[in-house]
Image: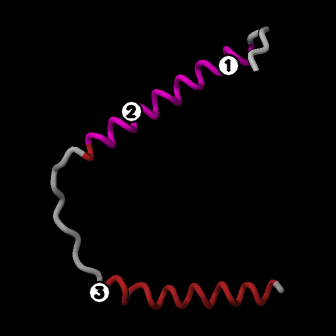
Amino acid sequence: MARTLFGFVAAAALVVALVMPAVAAQAPAPAPATSDASSIDQGVAYLLMIVALVLTYLIHPLDASSPYKLF
C-alpha cells in the first residue's frame, strides 16, 4: 500500500515537474505595475485585522479571569 502510494506521488511530481516549465514558457508577461488605491485598501485592511487581533488577546484574558459567568 505504501509503495503504491509513494509511486503514485512520485509519478505525479515528475509529471508536474516536466509540464510546469512548458506552461510557464507560454504564459504572457505580466503587465507593468500601476499605482491604484487597492494597495492602500489592503494596507488599511491589514491594519484593522492587527488591531482586532490585539484587542481580542487583550480582552480575552480579562474575560477568562472574571468571576462572572458571561456565557
Q: Look at the image and say whether residue 62 sits in the magenta stretch.
A: yes
Badge number at residue 26: 3
The location of residue 68, given as percent across then percent down, is 77, 9
Q: Is residue 8 above or below residue 64?
A: below
In the figure, is residue 54 to the left or right of 23? right
The residue that appears at 18% across and 59% down in the rendered structure is 33
Between the C-alphas of marks 1 and 2, the distance is 22 Å
Q: Earlier in the sequence, mark 2 or mark 3?
A: 3
Q: Earlier in the sequence, mark 1 or mark 2?
A: 2
| Corner quadrant of residue 27 | bottom left
Amino acid bearing label 3: Gln
Residue at numbered disc 1 = 61
Amino acid bearing label 1: Pro
Badge number at residue 47: 2
Q: Which residues are magenta?
A: 40-65
The residue that appears at 59% across and 87% down in the rendered structure is 12
Circle 1: element type: helix
**Principal secondary structure, stretch drawn in magenta:** helix
